[in-house]
Amino acid sequence: MPIYSTFANELSFAHFVEIHSEEDVYRLMDQWIFGSDFYLLGKWANTLFVGDYSWTVVRNAILGKEILSENDNEIVLRVWAGEDWEEFVLWTIAHGYLWLENLVSIPGSVWASPVQNIGAYGVEVGNVVSAVEWIALDQGVGHLVSLDTEACHFAYRNSIFKSELKGKFLITHVVFTLHKNMRNYNFTLAYQGLLDVMKNQEISESELTQAQLAEIISSIRASKLPDYKKLWTAGSFFKNPIVSKERYAVLKQDFPQLVSFDVEDPSTCKLSAGQLIDICGLKNYRLGNVGTYTKHALVLVNYGWASGQEIWEFAKFIQDQVYKKFEIMLSPEVNIIK
């Protein structure tokens, strides 16, 4: 059956199944759906399908939210994996639950958030995920597992679900611990772009509200990223590379405009993949129906009816050009399904 991702490239699978409960998962396991080739999907975002497949696609559509516990300072929420991420973040903001405001306007589903360890503007979701509940698909029978934060092996755009457990799990719930009390909470304002907008709007850090910060971040994202419903894309295509500070110092001699960001390891720093692509002259660059976005070099877009293979070939072209100039190989942030 033909299906379209947010890249709008048509692809074919043998079967498409939606699950709406844990019982649906066990029923599919009884039918041995998970014993053959299959792919688990949420909202069709952050994924590039390169070909056609004799697989079964299983879409996680389990919905719901519940409060496990709360006190004056924090709340623990158990969220069903099929919930829309954008809608969930707006729901937390509407209720005054703090910490996810920097992750507003990111398309996708709740189940994908810990898999990818999504992050933006100095915040990563792994910092507030208390547990991930999932069904082990390689057990032959339904086997519910819960992993705490440490066991999830969260890293930059990575987790255990993208490595050791890849293809062996179906996430049913994600447990978040969020703040409630502004007196014990500081917004993450690590990016200069946020501070610039606040300055232009004459908003001081002491006066900033959660709703204002979310609105600022949404506006910044809208100014840099296309609406995938109008211009087909998966958003930022590559991860920001991490290099040693010695390597950065050498690059800085040849490219004095090169910016860097501190990371947890003080001996390394993070570079801007978008800036590297831009320096290569590839911002607003187009080959056939595929190109980089006019406002942000890190965003690959499908301007026509490009195939997944065409988009992937263009991505490899970007990788090659960046490597030739900087000897840095960019890694895709988007999941490439070959």
Image: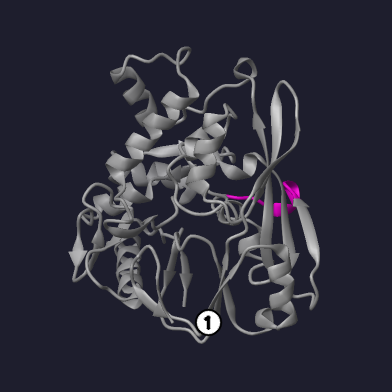
Give the side of residue 253 with respect to residue 168, left or right: left
Q: Quadrant of residue 229?
A: bottom left
Residues 196 and 3: in front is 3
Q: Which residue is mark 1?
A: 15
Can you give x and y, in whole percent of width and height, for residue 32 in the image? 70, 83
Q: Residue at x 29, y 43 (%)?
A: 224
Q: Residue at x 54, y 83 (%)?
A: 55
Q: Name the residue located 62 percent from the left edge and 55 percent from the top edge.
A: 81
Choose between 76 and 128: the one closer to the eye. Answer: 76
Q: Secondary structure at mark 1?
A: strand
Q: How is the image coloured?
A: one colour
Q: Residues within 10 Å of mark 1 (few under 14, many from 20)?
A: some
Q: Which quadrant holds residue 185?
A: top right
Give the magenta range: 148-155
Residue 234 visible in image: yes
Give the x, y percent position of residue 195. 38, 24
Give whichever of 271, 49 is nearer the camera.
Answer: 49
The verdict on residue 28 being magenta is: no
Q: Is residue 204 left or right of residue 54?
A: left
Instruction: Count the labels in the image.
Output: 1
- Is 255 situated left or right of 104 in this image? left
The residue depicted at 64 percent of the width and 72 percent of the height is 167
Q: What is the three-letter code of the residue carrying label 1? A: His
Q: Position of residue 180 (x, y in %)?
A: 64, 24
Is residue 325 in sight in this rendering? no
